[in-house]
Amino acid sequence: MDVTGVPDELVGFRTLFSAFHHFRPEQARAILGDAVRKHQGIAIFEGTYHSALAMFLMLLVPLMVLLVTLSSVPSAGRVCCGRTWSRWYLWFRYSMVWFHACGLTASRSYAI
């Protein structure tokens, strides 16, 4: 469905949870404009904030995951510090995805 032009037969209150930052500014304006033109309520819930502090705090998450990984119960096949290589690999992959997501999310949050 195109949320920038919701069909007239779909009426009711509109909600967006943790998704608004995925739209470009012109798309975001179109979504809000469509709701206003059709006299429909809209609520947008985002857990991000566009600031240097928010970006810094998001970048700490992989370190917290590493601490949990290091403190978790070791599994069979111990390699390094009682941990398997697969755990280190998964932590690294998770961290790289998280760093990428943090950069996009924090940079595309909107403020009114």
Image (tube, rainbow, N blue to C red):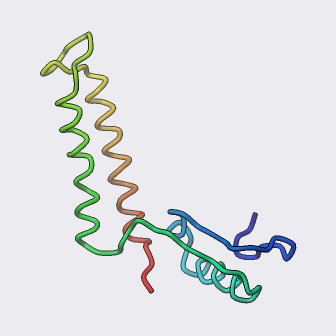
Relative side of 27 to 109, left or right: right
Above or below residue 70? Residue 58 is: below
Q: Quadrant of residue 11?
A: bottom right
Above or below residue 62? Residue 83 is: above
Outermost residue to the top: 76
Instruction: Tally the marks.
Output: 0
Q: Nearer the viewer, residue 91 or 38?
A: 38
Q: In the image, residue 98 lies at what x, y percent?
A: 35, 50
Q: Nearer the viewer, residue 65 or 23?
A: 65
> Who's the residue at 41% across and 63% down the image?
104
Q: In the image, residue 48 lies at what x, y percent?
A: 39, 67
Q: Quadrant of residue 73?
A: top left
Q: In the image, residue 36 lies at what x, y percent?
A: 69, 88
Q: Quadrant of the N terminus?
A: bottom right
> Who's the residue at 25% across and 19% down the image?
84
> Who's the residue at 35% across and 38% down the image?
93
Q: Quadrant of residue 12?
A: bottom right
Relative side of 17 to 50, left or right: right
Relative side of 29 to 50, left or right: right
Outermost residue to the left: 81
Q: Nearer the viewer, residue 60 or 73?
A: 73
Above or below residue 77? Residue 103 is: below
Above or below residue 89? Residue 21 is: below
> Who's the residue at 17% across and 30% down the image?
71
